[in-house]
Amino acid sequence: MQVTEFISVSDLASLMNIKPADVIKACMSLGIFVSINQRLDAELIEVVASEFNYEVQFISAEEQVEVEEEELDDPKDLVWRQPIVTVMGHVDHGKTSLLDFIRSANVAEGEAGGITQHIGAYEVKVGEDNDKEITFLDTPGHEAFTAMRARGAKVTDIAIIVIAADDSIMPQTREAISHAQAAGVPIVFAINKIDKPGADPERIKNELAQMNLLVESWGGKYQSQDISAKKGENVDKLLEKVLLEAELLELKANPARRAIGTVLEASLDKGRGYVTKMLVENGTLHDGDPIIAGEFSGKVKAMFNERGKKIKEAGPATPVLVLGLPGAPQAGEKIKVARSDSEAKEIATKRAQIIREQANRASKRISLDEIGRRLALGNFKELNLIVKGDVDGSIEALSDSLIKLSMEKIQVNVIHKAVGQIVDSDVMLASASDAIIIGFQVRPSITARKLAEKEGVEIKMYSIIYEAIEEIKAAMEGMLEPTKEEEIMGQVEIREVYKISKVGTVAGCFVLEGKISRNHYIRIVRDGIVVYPGNANQNAELASLKRFKEDAKEVKSGMECGITIKNFNDIKPGDIIESYVINEVKTMLK
Ligand code: GDP
């Protein structure tokens, strides 16, 4: 049974096809008093469901709403779509200049007015014949990129990381790289300002190599292009490399389906009401479509492109400005076309309810305490950490030791490490990647602390490396599912077999070793081979255990007993019954 955590008593009951009163009774028998509309936590849901023989699998609230909306694409409807690109890099390395140059140089001729509207993104035509397109998000920098990701939006296919060739790899360059890597977005490096005296692109490539980022001309996998954003030199070559990277990604979309996209920005406009700037990601958005974004539902009243032109439809990877929602959804929120107005309304109402609940709940982000609960929910496989410290040496030492805590079931990733204070962008990265921040001999800035509180990001601070490692290790042990280990309890020999009508086949036995108990699992071994149960994953049980006609709880070595086995009668004298129990063992780290 798939359920969301915090499902209400009445919903849980209807899922199990029983009366709410039965769920309430079950809770009462556990000593917990609940009302019919009360929402239950994961642990209680599991226990109650198991009372009624249901095994539960937890899904998130969004997933539940999503499931109902899922629309599958027929592979034959899929067509190539243009890539969506974000430009990132250190301040003053030339991000804005690059975007400006691309915007002015690559607007197709004949389209009057150029780009006049800020709609969060724009499309440019590229390639020799201007026959290819790229969509650029027009807010450069990793802050916006990661803020989007924190909302669960992935609106970037490729990141261009701009590095000034007359400077070197700066803290924000490193951050931008970490943020792109954490998002799993391929990077194309743009080594900028090559027109400047003192520019040395090779030095930058060398620095990248030291970070384990080998560019192609150095025999690595990262594409890079030396450019001058100011003069526009080689920008065309850079865009070709972006297209090449895009081809590798095999970006596909289905223009025939109902549109789905992401809100880039929304605001209240004096004359026009709420305007939503969005990127259509899949499908085609039409004038008049019923749409939902977050808790708002409405109808597309009008759409405009980045040139301020009214359009009737917008296909995959196109940015549009939409009028028609009754409010301003958050940036990063999904925006979808519903089947009908009423469906849009219904989903929006459901969402509003979920949003209220989530707001009521404590933080849902990962924390050391949260780890155990997540594991119980069965969806926790990775522990992401951001390590900030006072000196390089201790960051390296700490990161290495933390990564070494990784084990088969949980991978520890250090997604970003740097010297210095814990700052806002660390918190946003943590929020987007569901990471915990480890501060070694450093403290968060005041704004970062506030932001962490708001986003529910845990910041742990240590001044002794050993303590940091021990604490995380302990949390990970808590979060490990116990492994099951079998313990053999006894060996019992079958000496005689009686067939008794109504009762079945009774074995007259002698306990050779250890003991056998009513609640032990058993298996039957004949000439060294297990003959029952047939499947090693099954556990067979006794139907009865008797001593001198009386039911016995346990029979010890050296004693005789009578045994019947549940669902199995094919026993022979000489067979050995092996009794065992299954212990749950807490996994320890080595
Ligand atoms: P951003 O902070 O990364 O957006 O950087 P800007 O695009 O604002 O550029 C910062 C400064 O570098 C500006 O004064 C630009 O004119 C200058 N700049 C950007 N690209 C180049 C370039 O290719 N060559 C030279 N000489 N200057 C550049």
Image (cartoon, grey):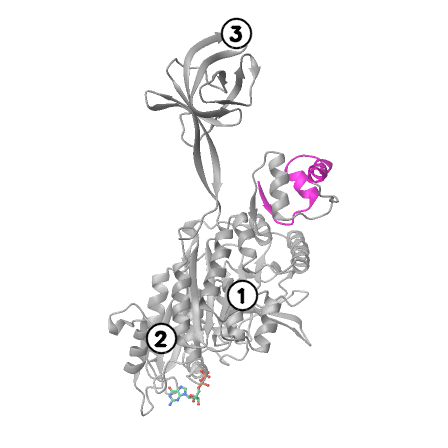
Amino acid type assigned to the residue bearing label 3 in the image: Ser
Q: Which residue is mark 3?
A: 501
In depth, the one of 108 and 445 nearer the eye is: 445
Give the distance between the C-alpha atoms of the residues marked 1 and 2, in whole angstroms. 26 Å
Is residue 223 shown left or right of residue 85?
left
Residue 195 on the magenta span = no
Considering every residue shown, the one lying at the far front of the view is 558
Amino acid type assigned to the residue bearing label 2 in the image: Phe
In depth, the one of 316 and 381 nearer the eye is: 381
Specify which label sits upstream in the sequence, 2 or 3.
Answer: 2
Specify which label sits upstream in the sequence, 1 or 2.
Answer: 2
Q: Residues within 10 Å of mark 3 (few under 14, many from 20)?
A: few
Q: Residue 271 got which mark?
A: none
Q: Which residues are magenta?
A: 1-30
Q: Examine the rendered structure and indicate whether residue 309 appears above or below residue 585.
A: below
Residue 33 seen in the current view = yes
Specify which label sits upstream in the sequence, 1 or 3.
Answer: 1
Q: Horizontal and vertical percent for residue 21?
A: 73, 37
Question: Residue placed at 73% from the left, 46% from the top?
Answer: 37
Answer with the quadrant where ligand 1 appears in the image.
bottom left
Give the distance between the C-alpha atoms of the residues marked 2 and 3, in whole angstroms. 83 Å
Question: Residue placed at 43% from the left, 71% from the top?
Answer: 417
Q: Which residue is mark 2?
A: 189
Q: Which one is closest to the eye, mark 1 or mark 3?
A: 3
Amino acid type assigned to the residue bearing label 1 in the image: Ser
Q: How many marks?
A: 3
Is residue 388 shown left or right of residue 336?
left
Q: Residues within 10 Å of mark 2 (few under 14, many from 20)?
A: many
Q: Which residue is mark 1?
A: 431
Q: Which one is closest to the eye, mark 2 or mark 3?
A: 3
Identify the secondary structure beneath mark 2.
Answer: strand
Is residue 111 shown left or right of residue 215?
right
